[in-house]
Amino acid sequence: MASEIHMPAPVCLIENIRGQLVANQEALEILAANKNPLVVVAIVGLYRTGKSYLMNKLAGKNKGFSIGTTVQSHTKGIWMWCVPHAKKPNHTLVLLDTEGLGDVEKGDKKNDTQIFALAILLSSIFVYNTMNKIDQRAIDLLHYVTELSNRLRKVSSPDFEGVEDATNLESFCPDFVWALRDFYLTLEVDEQVITADEYLENSLRLKQGTNQSVQNFNLPRLCIKEFFPIRKCFIFDSPTHRKKLAKLESLPNEDLDPEFVEQVATFCSYIFNHSKTKALPGGIKVNGPRLKSLVLTYINAISRGDLPCMENSVLALAQIKNSAAVKKAIAHYDQQMGQKVQLPTETLQELLDLHRESEREAIELFMKNSFKDMDQKFQKELETLLEARKDDLYEQNMEASSYRCSALLQAIFGPLENDVMQGIYSKPGGHHLLIQKTELLKARYYWEPRKGMQAEKALQEYLHSRQSTSDAILQIDLALTKRQKEIEEAHMKAMAAKIEAQRLEVIQRYNLQMMEQREWLHQEQVRQMQMFRKYQVQQQQRALERRFQEEAENLNKKIEAEHRSLQNEIQDLQRNAASQDDQDDKCILL
């Protein structure tokens, strides 16, 4: 069952006793008794700027937190008022009103810083109350305290039950509200009307460029955006005439500026409707006992001196910011080299080129995030760390190369070693075959990519380790080759004698064949001559027969011709005789 809340008025939570912050036991007991989840709203700003008035309105009261009407600061330390939350049932709204910053009577900037940092760390909504406008001084102060708050949170690291990571930044970052009091400017940019939220974001907008002045301008804005991801801005007109401010808490709304009344109502509505419950890492909601533990933890850390108490805030920021810039640059270098470098690299130059590229990016990132590293102390530290990482990568590269080459040599030459062990090369000419095979495998080894810088050394060491085996095979080869040569010489002599005998036998067979061929040729010649003579006689006989036949034919032809000539003469004589008889007959007739 939710605990009841009975706080008719605020009590001091953290007292400021002569510059020392001390937790008030009464307030701690109130917190210890409250088991409700808490929404913690803290307000910080210069003294005499109306912080307490806004906190009273959030409590639903006109009076409560002390509202000063003189030049003397009223609120000392941090005051707490626990009231039921207006919009969240069973939740307690814890209002923390802080001692005004810049009190001339106190004159202690360290104490201001401590109160400011505590307000940020304890709240779930942090209200930054400033006058008139957003200026560089207010941004620098906010940046400085957020950095110190983050550092205090880290060195404290309270170990609450169920908390696994008490350094989770997002769980501790409160929502941020910038309250601008007595705002007199016109909300316009380039003749365009803007909202208060746009005015805040424009004020936190980064400049383009990388020179030192731009970096100094951008650094606090980057940090504020990172620390306060959720941001809101409200502007407030002056509540009433200056002479009536002394009675502000007793004035009815009718006597106040209507716009101011409306602005306060809008502010309260936003806090009630958008406030988040204070939580620890892991999403654990903070109740009264846990907030009590946080208060004691942070006060003890401040008492131990864990919160820097440097008089020069710029020096404090530089130390914090430059240390973070070095870590960020180193992390970027490690990330880039992890992504780009594939060990082993083929050459040292390849590794150095990747190193120089990542080193350049890391230094550029450091320069972008560094802050007033005047003597380049942190840049030199970064360069030393980068050099050490380069040396470490070189060693890793050599080891990776040796491992890769060893595995590669075993894979390539392993089958050859097995063949040697099985005696495949223990034969005449085996050493020559071994050398040939080794050269082929060496060529294959050289062809394999990404062996790294140990490639040649690893190969030579391997070949040297196998030299004794090669020498043994050479001796076996020489011994077997000598015996083989003797056997081959004897075999060659036997073969030569056999060939010579075969040659003589062939010659003898050839000579015999030649004699037989000559005899056959002689007989053939004789036979041819006899046949030629017979042929000649036959030809002569045929010639004589043809001549005799021709002469006979010619004689016959001559006889026939003479016979025909004789017949013709007889016929002529007969015709002539007939003709004469006719003439004689005619004469007779006549």
Image: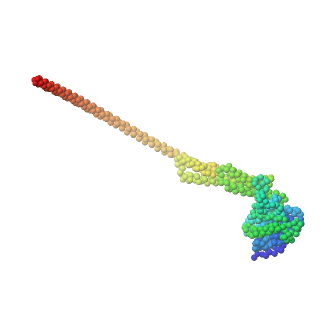
Point out the image quarter for the C terminus. Answer: top left
- Residue depicted at 58% across the width and 52% down the height: 413
- View extreme (left): residue: 588
Q: Quadrant of residue 180?
A: bottom right
In the depicted structure, whether residue 318 falls above or below residue 440: below
Say left or right for 518 vs 344. left
The percent coordinates of residue 312 (x first, y second) are 84, 58
Could you say which is closer to the camera, residue 581 or residue 258?
581
The percent coordinates of residue 243 (x first, y second) are 89, 66
Q: How is the image coloured?
A: rainbow
The percent coordinates of residue 257 (x first, y second) are 84, 67
Point out the image quarter for the N terminus. Answer: bottom right
- View extreme (front): residue: 590
- Residue depicted at 84% across the width and 63% down the height: 182
Does residue 49 appear anywhere in the picture?
yes
Q: Quadrant of residue 225?
A: bottom right
- Residue depicted at 84% across the width and 70% down the height: 254
Say left or right for 588 vs 554. left
Say left or right for 542 vs 581. right
In the depicted structure, whether residue 540 falls above or below residue 501: above
Does residue 27 appear anywhere in the picture?
no
The percent coordinates of residue 229 (x first, y second) are 75, 63
Could you say which is closer to the camera, residue 435 or residue 23?
23
Could you say which is closer to the camera, residue 218 or residue 385?
218
